[in-house]
Amino acid sequence: MITRWGLAFMLVGLLVAGLLYDRVAPLSAEVDDAEADRLVVSPSVADPPRLDVAWYCPVGSSSAGGYADHTVNIANLDDESAVANLTVITDTGPGPRRRLELPPLSTQRIRLADIQTADVAGAVVEVIGGRGAVGHTVTTASGVAEGPCATEASSTWHFASGRTTADAQEYLVLMNPFPETAVFDVTFQSVARTRKPGALQAAFVEARSIRVIDVNDVASGDDVLAAKITTNRGRLVVERLQLLDGQLGATGAALQLGVPTPARSWMFTAGRVHADGDDLLTIYNPNEFDLTADQLAAAALDQGDAADDDDATAGDDDAADPATADETDPAAEEGELSPLIGEDGTTTVAIELWPSNPTDLSTYSVVTIEREVRPGNLVTIDLRAQAERFEFPLPYELGVFVTSNEGVPIVAERWQFADRLISDLGTAVAGTGTDDGDATAEGTEGLVPELQAPEAPPTNELPQPVATEGVSTSRGHELFSTRWVIPWVTMVGDSTLIAVSSADEAAIEIRSLAAVGRWDGPLRATVPAGGRVIVPVTSGTGGAAVEVVSDTPVSVEAMVVLPDQSLDVVPGVPTVAG
């Protein structure tokens, strides 16, 4: 099993460099007709992305009464001017193109309805110079959702969970920004069965266009529905819009980009478990056990590394068995299946609860939760039930770290509902397992860090109101980084906080691009090893881009509770130098 200290050693290899600092002179906003018809795309080859690449924003519409009124938020985080080329992409092809001047330290919000009217309207934004960051906001009948745009296209995309019950509407939006037609297949996986709708096998997304899939039309009635999109030709950018209308509890909207590449571990930083809502974690093993020799070798290497780490912490309750800690099957290098993985590709996942104060783990006798996930299958864990099992005082700030013990790549999603769900369809929520812990003392409900004033004592009061409606989804982060950007997040009153988690103690600085030419901050805090901090941020302009810098790799998400007390989680984007 990977321990917290084992994780700390893993993260050393993930340390990344600073943001790109290219400089350019301001360019003219004049664009001739020939250039306006040209779609420029330069997808990122860096992972995590640089900040001078194309950003892809698939979900949205720009017509009266459209399903998701689309606003694109473009920030220049540099102290020199930059230029952004924005191209509208519709289901019938590319639309108008706009060239936008980006003054130093500024954000421009572009409502696509002001450029073109279309039932389906996404955008490609190419940032030239400066340090660009692009997110988008959609307004729907169920609520407002926001998130970062993508910086890469891929031949595969995964979603661990979706919802197509009577109260839900799920859209998968496929963008093809390239000049060749893309051909794709879609597979849906629920707890009970696999679906491969005929209309979505060898289907097309025309060049430089968008295709919207109404999932309810092909896979209705599921409260947990994973999806896998694979291209036979070309590459796509895939994003999901999830809507809930309140019939079965929660009302709200959530945006989420898919996962191009499954990973062995995922961190979910922002989260609050409370008695009046549901908090579900779904883990999907998308492999049909056709792992390549290279994947098997990598999995075996991961296992060896993890075993070495665990052996170094012998005596810890979660340490590996000394008899097997140093074993790595050389057969994996020859393309044979390592017995550590399991003959049929099954993996055991470990779910660690990360409170803001790591000492709460012993206070409430918290143990690691384990579940077995077979290839092509998924499991769901009820995190509220787990919090109640360990007798956490609710509401309680809680992150989650998920690891595939055998190194088999997985994807995961955390869904937070402000209301309890009412469903007669039998949500597949795993049981609470064994080793129930007894509560021994009262703990904190969400530790607020000391910001700019070391003499100020921590407080147990939540820095936000508790959401009374809304839904948020998060795919988590597979990477810890020393630099993060949130291209845009709503800030109204005390609506917004930045959640930061780290395996090692980390010193962080957070600043917001609150006004043209000026940063607000920095706010400074220390993240405890194996814990989290939650830092409230504010802006007088209704929202801002946010930058987080740390001295050791961390994970970053924002959580928003708007004045109507609806809920949203906005992921950070890890960044590296070019």
Image (spheres, rainbow, N blue to C red):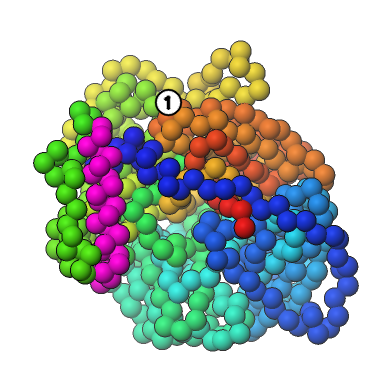
| Camera-side residue of 211 and 410 | 410
Q: Is residue 482 left or right of residue 183?
A: right
Q: Is residue 520 left or right of residue 182?
A: right
Q: Is residue 569 magenta?
A: no
Q: Main secondary structure of the magenta part?
A: helix
Tell me the SS state at disc 1. Answer: loop
Quarter of the rendering containing residue 546: top right
The percent position of residue 220, horizontal first and vertical second, equals: 38, 69
Q: Between residue 129 and residue 471, name the one nearer to us.
A: 129
Residue 187, given in percent of the width and then of the height, sits at 35, 74
**Looking at the figure, which quarter contains the C terminus?**
bottom right
Give 288 or 308, whichever is nearer the viewer: 308
Residue at left offset 87%, top offset 68% = 29
Question: What is the x, y in percent for residue 555?
Answer: 49, 43
**Image point (19%, 39%), residue name:** 320
Q: Which residues are magenta?
A: 287-313
Question: Callout 1: 10 Å neighbours few (<14), some, many (20+)?
Answer: many
Amino acid type at circle 1 is Asn
Q: Is residue 212 visible?
A: no
Residue 285 vertical position relative to residue 216 in the rendered view, above or below: above
Residue 236 visible in the shown view: yes
The residue under the point 37% across, 18% down is 442
Q: Quadrant of residue 193?
A: bottom left
Give the labeled residue for mark 1.
357
